[in-house]
Image (cartoon, helix red, strand yellow):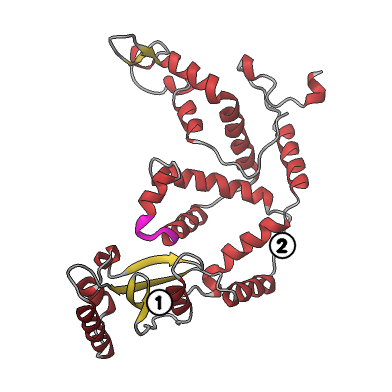
Amino acid sequence: MKKLTIAATLTAGVLLLSACSPEEDTKSGSDEATSDSAVVVESKVGDITKDDFYNEMKNYIGESALYNMVVIRVLEDKYEVSDEEVDEAVQEAKDAQGDMFSMWLMQQGYPDEDAFREQTYQRLLQEKLMFEDVEISDAQIEEKFNEMKENNELQIRASHILIQENEETSAEEAEALVQEVQQKLDEGADFAELAKEYSTDGSAANGGDLGYFGTGKMVKEFEEAAFALGEDEVSGPVKSEFGTHFIKVTDVPTLDEKKEEIRRQLAMEEIDYTAVQEKMDKLIEDAKIDVKIEEFKDLFVKPEAQG
């Protein structure tokens, strides 16, 4: 019997394989359009049928795809993940990535948000098994949060106004702009509007928003000033190699906001993977799985039973 790699997630190939399986072929359309011999690609150099496609997918990813599909069914029979849990996890990713969420999905290999949502559901389902015997107290979470806060390990969100000396702006003109921005801030002008008007980098269009970042992501002068600010506080002029910044911190995470993330982080450190594997093996054994595809008939058979 194969071992479940707990940290692994199902690939898009799983969905592709199930999408072109013979079982799905019978659900809609005419016999000709849904038969295994139906042509899915036509070309001058030859056609590819649905059967060709299915067999190719089976050869490349069939074993791992089939195994993962069955594992998910086994876990679904034992555990439940609510839509609300998935919503929260997806929103957490959206909050972390901000305006870059769509690009991040592409970089991670997800064709769209629905695919990410499905993978998130599967991850949470596996975590139900992994965390079932792990208990993390609120006191542990608070202690970890305070430690992260003290060490500046929590990501904050900030905006900035960057004023630079360049070919069009002399040092004297740049300094005059710095004084002008400072005066307007002192008078209560809107930070985002000032960023759109004065800032000289790409964040200007978004009101200076830089999204979330932790330590080590920004130049030293910027980082030190940003992490010294409280939420909604604005710095005075901060000079760095890039120019002069005005910084506004727009979000400092609270304990309530980070509680579940920290709980999960601490739980991961407490997992007994041997025990988890044994539970997974027992669930698979109890499911009485009988694979009908000849090439994979021993996929869930214990090694000692194959001899």
Nearer the camera: disc 2 or disc 1: 1
Identified at 41% across, 23% down, the residue is 27
- The reply to whether callout 2 and callout 1 are in contact (CB within 8 Å) is no
Q: Quadrant of the N terminus?
A: top right
Q: Amino acid at mark 2?
A: Glu
Q: Earlier in the sequence, mark 2 or mark 1?
A: 2
Q: Quadrant of residue 67?
A: top right
Write down the residue under mark 1.
249
Region of the chain picked out in magenta, as a range: 96-100
What x and y, as percent, mark residue 74? 64, 37
Q: Foreground residue, 166 or 146?
A: 166
Identified at 53% across, 52% down, the residue is 82
| 167 in relation to 128, above or below | below
Q: How many marks?
A: 2
Q: Quadrant of residue 279?
A: top right
Near mark 2 (Cα within 10 A), the count class, few <14, some 14-19 or many ≥20, is few
Identified at 49% across, 22% down, the residue is 57
Write down the residue under mark 2.
135
Disc 2/disc 1 C-alpha distance (Å)? 34 Å
What x and y, as percent, mark residue 222? 42, 74
Does the magenta-highlighted stretch encompass residue 222? no
- Magenta span: predominant SS is helix
Q: Quadrant of the C terminus?
A: top right
